[in-house]
Image (cartoon, helix red, strand yellow):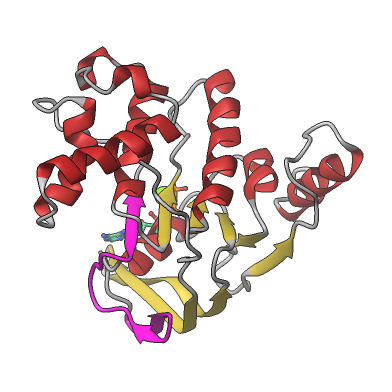
């Protein structure tokens, strides 16, 4: 079966978005009046110091957290709670241990009422896409960390979301697995025409994947910055322009 790749990427419009949390009796302003347009099919990568609000922003986009002020709209419709056009991938894939790889990936379709044979057929397509065709009948406990995370990615893709939201999806992987997963994510993103919003601590990963990098300010008074990464794909980490972008990002963090 072929699952046809259509241009389904969602367009995200963020206006005047603010979020605070009460911490030790005081209001901590995490996001302040953020305006941002994420283009349909774009890969936007969010970086920033620990505590700068990356996860908070992603959770608001996912509809898991409400903003205090401002709006998020997807293709012109205001986001209120979670929605089928968005899928979230966390650092840990959280697979269901009593289901096989196939069962885990097909699960999201089955709960949406897709008949089992069709759900499994589509699940097999995405399991193959992440390079795990031979492991469809394996159990989660039989997988390495990188394989489990690939199952998590297949599970998210199977419901064919317009927007994929990823919070440090490769953060728990070793350096080698991480690099090959970055290459896979770049390939999947271009094959699936999905809008991708990805949070990472890894500046090289940001430059490898992003059309644009959003840098959230560390200082609460600071403004968010956007940097376009104008490099051809697939990208070459050792190429001089790539290295220059990396040095530029390091400077943003006062590390160079
Ligand atoms: N549910 C919550 N209740 C109270 N404070 C919260 C809550 N969630 C986040 N915060 C606070 O908001 C700030 C931003 O948190 P967030 O998790 O968005 O940061 P982050 O940029 O993802 O950090 P990290 O890189 O460490 O994952 C932190 O100071 C945190 O303490
Ligand atoms: Mg976080």
Q: List x then y, in percent, for residue 70.
A: 40, 86
Left or right of 94 on screen, residue 89:
right
Q: Is residue 71 magenta?
A: yes
Question: Which quadrant would the C terminus be assigned to in this image?
Answer: top right
| Residue 226 drawn above or below residue 238 | below
Using the image as rendered, state which of residue 134 and residue 226 is in the foreground. 134
> For the point 14% across and 53% down, which residue is it?
114
Q: Position of residue 63 (x, y in %)?
A: 28, 68
- Identified at 39% across, 49% down, the residue is 3
Residue 35 image offset from top left, x and y in percent: 55, 81
Q: Is residue 35 above or below residue 118?
A: below
Quadrant location, the N terminus: top left
**Residue 80 seen in the current view:** yes
Q: Does the magenta segment cover residue 33?
A: no
Comparing 18 with 23, the one in front is 18
> Is 27 located above or below residue 108 in the figure?
below
Residue 141 percent location from the top left of the image: 21, 16
Q: Residue at x 53, y 22 (%)?
A: 177
* Left or right: 112 in relation to 168: left
Count how many numbered circles sit on residues in the image: 0
Residue 91 shows in this picture: no
Question: At x 58% / y 55%, what residue is drawn?
Answer: 45
Q: Farthest residue in the right direction?
A: 240
In the rendered structure, the answer to whether residue 137 lies left or right of residue 158 reads left
Start-end of magenta stretch? 68-88
- Most extreme residue toward the front is 1
């Amino acid at each position: 079966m072929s699952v046809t790749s259509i241009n389904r990427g969602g367009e995200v419009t963020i206006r005047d978005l603010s979020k605070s949390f009460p911490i030790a009796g005081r209001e901590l302003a995490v996001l302040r009046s953020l305006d941002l347009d994420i283009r349909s099919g774009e890969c936007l990568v969010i970086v920033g110091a620990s505590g700068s609000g990356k996860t908070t922003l992603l959770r608001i986009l996912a509809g898991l957290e409400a903003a205090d002020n401002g709006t998020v709209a997807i293709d012109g419709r205001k986001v209120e709670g979670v929605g089928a056009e968005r899928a979230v991938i966390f650092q840990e894939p959280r697979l269901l241990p009593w289901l096989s790889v196939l069962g885990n990936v097909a699960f999201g379709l089955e709960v949406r009422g897709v008949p089992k044979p069709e759900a499994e057929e589509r699940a097999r397509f995405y399991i193959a896409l992440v390079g795990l065709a031979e492991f469809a009948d394996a159990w989660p406990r039989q997988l390495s960390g990188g394989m489990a995370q690939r199952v998590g990615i297949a599970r998210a893709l199977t419901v064919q979301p317009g927007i994929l939201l990823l919070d440090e999806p490769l953060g728990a992987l070793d350096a080698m697995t991480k690099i090959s997963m970055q290459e896979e994510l770049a390939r999947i993103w271009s094959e699936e025409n999905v809008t991708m919003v990805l949070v990472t601590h890894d500046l090289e990963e940001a430059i490898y994947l992003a059309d644009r990098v959003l840098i959230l300010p560390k200082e609460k008074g600071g403004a968010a910055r956007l940097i376009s990464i104008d490099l051809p794909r697939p990208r070459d980490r050792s190429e001089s322009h790539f290295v220059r972008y990396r040095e530029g990002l390091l400077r943003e963090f006062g590390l160079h």
